């Protein structure tokens, strides 16, 4: 990597780590207000709808901020993508670091977390998104190390399949609940007040890891061989 890329990685990394602290503090206050134990499940359905709406906007704003910093430091789409997933990964990893420092949470590797709310609740053991972030870091470094090598369409397809597999694994449990109760609000409310997820779809996660690894290896082999 050249000096400019290394400098950009440091700057973007500091931004993402600092942003993660801000996000962790928001979650810190929300937990103090609405959750009095260490577990987030069953979810607190008494959180005001106005707070939920603001959380949805905040989540969108977080992605916009990560995209903005990637677009500021790169010109090519491939590099913008690399800086975005790098920023996202650093932000996600440090988010859990700051929660551990401030809330002493998570307590163990398989503790479940609420990851996202759009378009419905995403949940998994917290270590899963961290593993996904490590994969994104590897991918970002590989792309930025070989600026002249293009990401081929088949590699983009593999990365998209990997991302979809990860996302579906995160929403799997709550999609199943919504389908089982035909989106009936009274019945869903009753279920959600007692539901504690215990089973994660490891097969979908493994599928995502496989396709992401395949894409990274394919790009790496071409780049090392000097091919575009």
Image (tube, grey):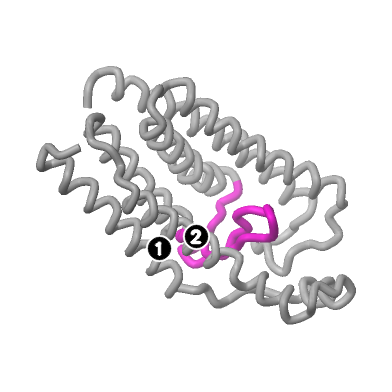
Which corner quadrant of the image does residue 61 belong to? top right
Q: Is residue 138 visible?
A: no
Q: Check the picture and name the quadrant holding the N terminus.
A: top left
Residue 176 shows which numbered tag?
Answer: none
Residue with the mark numbered 2 = 164
Tell me how far mark 2 sits from mark 1, CA to CA. Answer: 8 Å
* Residue closest to the far left: 225
**Callout 2: 10 Å neighbours few (<14), some, many (20+)?**
some
Q: How many marks?
A: 2
Q: Quadrant of residue 224?
A: top left
Give me the residue at 79% from left, 62% from top.
44
Q: Which residue is mark 1?
A: 208
Q: Quadrant of residue 59?
A: top right
Earlier sequence position, callout 2 versus callout 1? 2
Q: Is residue 128 above or below residue 1?
A: below
Residue at 42 percent across and 21 percent down: it is 73
Queried whether the magenta region covers residue 127, the answer comes back as yes
- Residue 169 x %, y %: 52, 67
Where is residue 34 shown, x and y percent of the image?
79, 54
Residue closest to the eye, 173 or 221: 221
Direction from residue 134 to residue 191 in the image, left or right: right
Spot the residue most to the front: 153
Identify the residue shown where x is 25% and y is 18%. Answer: 3
- Give SS at disc 1: helix
Asked whether disc 2 touches disc 1, contact meaning CB atoms under 8 Å apart, the reply is yes
Q: Which residues are magenta?
A: 103-128
Residue 220 at x, y = what percent? 20, 46
Give SS at disc 2.
helix
166 sits left or right of 190 in the view: left
């Amino acid at each position: 990597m050249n000096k400019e890329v290394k400098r950009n990685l440091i700057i973007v990394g500091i931004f993402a780590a600092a942003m993660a602290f801000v996000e962790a503090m928001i979650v810190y206050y929300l937990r103090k207000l609405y959750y009095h134990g260490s577990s987030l499940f069953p979810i607190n359905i008494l959180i005001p709808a106005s707070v939920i709406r603001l959380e949805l906007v905040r989540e969108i704003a977080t992605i916009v901020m990560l995209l903005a910093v990637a677009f500021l430091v790169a010109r090519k789409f491939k590099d913008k993508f690399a800086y975005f997933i790098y920023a996202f990964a650093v932000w996600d990893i440090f988010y859990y670091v700051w929660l551990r420092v401030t809330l002493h949470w998570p307590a163990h590797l398989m503790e479940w977390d609420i990851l996202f709310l759009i378009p419905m609740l995403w949940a998994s053991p917290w270590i899963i998104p961290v593993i996904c972030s490590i994969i994104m870091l590897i991918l970002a470094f590989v792309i930025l190390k070989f600026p002249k090598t293009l990401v081929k369409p088949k590699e983009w397809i593999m990365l998209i399949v990997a991302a979809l597999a990860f996302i579906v694994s995160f929403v799997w449990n709550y999609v199943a609940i919504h389908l089982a109760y035909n989106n009936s609000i009274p019945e869903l409310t009753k279920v959600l007040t007692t539901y504690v997820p215990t089973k994660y779809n490891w097969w979908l996660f493994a599928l995502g890891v496989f396709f992401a690894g395949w894409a990274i290896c394919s790009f790496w082999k071409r780049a090392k061989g000097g091919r575009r």
